[in-house]
Image (cartoon, rainbow, N blue to C red):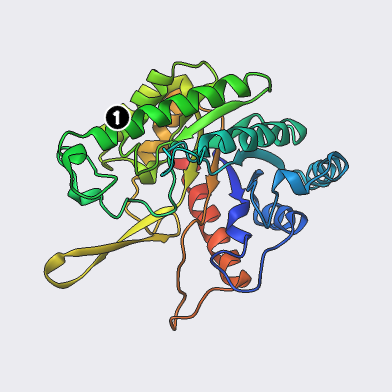
């Protein structure tokens, strides 16, 4: 049997994708404890726990509250973006670094050893030009630069150097940076491994999310998790559903509850057990959804998804 340490991602109750506004961090901790979760992932953005809004005293009070409820903090999930800016005088990465520094300090204050980072993040999965590329996803419209992959190459280099700078800054804190593989620059598992290897910093680890794997075959899952090995530092649980239209055409994907998607969970958790992964698996709701009747969800609907997802993942422990 393998203990799957489940964390509730605070972003789920941020009011982005449900009616009724955001909950407080105390309310989120209460729900995590009530539903059986071991931890909470901190969403370090407004309106939840943006570091600039939280004094040292307020952080201590929340930490004490969480401990009283038996809840730990699994990760600080920073949404960073180390892509190039669109103007020479707009230093985006220079703004990312001090923000990430604040996230590392927040993690230290909350006795949390992991800060999740994104290599490149535009909210949407793909660039609007992604299918106009030549041998690689495009990040701008078709041009001489795109035809030579220069657009992608320049982004890759810029992202890599930004992560390296972030890692040097984070060395002052007792945290690791868990890099989540996420488009539009790190587009597949191989890209994730390549980026971590090329950054070459001991405190940059791998955030390995099964829903983002290239394939869901047992062989690919085992190969990927084994390759991550001791560098695996964080993971998300959610489901991805494929939406089919006429003649089996795929027109969209949607975020569903773990167990309702395409993910092959049992071999994934077996592989995690094999490599000795003892970290958390955070259930994240990071996309909009409708409930029956084409109604926007409210907090009660989010609650039901959190409980259902937790119960499904928990039920797998006896199979591992």
The percent position of residue 260, horizontal first and vertical second, equals 38, 59
Residue 232 at least partly seen: no
Q: Residue at x 53, y 66 (%)?
A: 17
Residue 210 at least partly seen: yes
The percent position of residue 241, horizontal first and vertical second, equals 33, 60
Side (left or right) of 206 relative to 248:
right
Q: Residue at x 66, y 69 (%)?
A: 21
Number of numbered labels in the structure image: 1
The percent position of residue 2, horizontal first and vertical second, equals 51, 34
Side (left or right) of 31 relative to 137:
right
Report the residue that reaches farthest toward the front: 89
Disc 1 on helix, strand or loop?
helix
The image quadrant that residue 73 belongs to is top right
Q: Nearer the viewer, residue 129 or 76?
A: 129
The image quadrant that residue 61 belongs to is top right
Side (left or right) of 286 relative to 73:
left
Q: Nearer the viewer, residue 156 or 310?
A: 156
The image quadrant that residue 247 belongs to is bottom left
Side (left or right) of 160 relative to 36:
left
Within-10-Å neighbours for mark 1: few <14, some 14–19, many 20+: few
> The C terminus lies in which quarter of the figure?
top left
From this view, report whether residue 40 is shown above or below residue 84. below
The percent position of residue 267, horizontal first and vertical second, equals 35, 37
Q: Residue at x 31, y 39 (%)?
A: 187
Which residue is label 1 attached to?
A: 190
Q: Residue at x 58, y 44 (%)?
A: 6
Q: Nearer the viewer, residue 51 or 149?
A: 149
Report the residue that reaches farthest toward the left: 247
């Amino acid at each position: 049997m393998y203990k799957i340490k489940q964390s509730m991602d605070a972003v789920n109750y941020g009011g982005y994708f449900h009616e009724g506004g955001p909950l407080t961090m105390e309310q989120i901790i209460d729900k995590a404890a009530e539903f059986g979760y071991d931890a909470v992932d901190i969403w370090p953005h407004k309106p939840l726990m943006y570091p600039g809004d939280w004094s040292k005293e307020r952080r201590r009070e929340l930490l004490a509250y969480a401990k009283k409820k038996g809840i730990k903090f699994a990760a600080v999930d920073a949404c960073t973006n180390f892509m190039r800016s669109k103007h020479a005088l707009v230093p985006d990465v220079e703004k990312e670094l001090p923000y990430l520094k604040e996230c590392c300090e927040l993690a230290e204050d909350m006795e949390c050893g992991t800060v999740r980072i994104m290599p490149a993040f535009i909210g949407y999965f793909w660039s609007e030009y992604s299918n106009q590329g030549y041998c690689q996803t495009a990040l701008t419209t078709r041009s001489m630069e795109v035809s030579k992959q220069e657009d992608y190459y320049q982004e890759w280099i810029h992202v890599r150097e930004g992560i390296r700078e972030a890692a040097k800054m984070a060395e002052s804190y007792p945290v690791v940076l868990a890099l989540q593989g996420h488009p539009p620059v790190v587009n597949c598992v191989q890209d994730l491994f390549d980026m971590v290897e090329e950054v070459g910093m001991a405190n940059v680890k791998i955030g390995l999310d099964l829903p983002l794997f290239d394939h869901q075959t047992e062989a690919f899952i085992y190969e990927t998790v084994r390759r991550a090995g001791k560098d695996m530092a964080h993971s998300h649980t959610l489901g991805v559903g494929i939406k089919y239209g006429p003649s089996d055409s795929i027109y969209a994907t949607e975020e569903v509850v773990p167990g309702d998607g395409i993910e092959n969970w049992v071999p994934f958790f077996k592989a995690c057990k094999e490599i000795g992964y003892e970290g958390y698996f955070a259930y994240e709701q990071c996309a909009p959804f409708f409930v029956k009747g084409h109604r926007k969800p409210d907090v009660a609907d989010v609650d039901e998804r959190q409980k259902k997802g937790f119960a499904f993942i928990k039920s797998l422990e006896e199979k591992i």
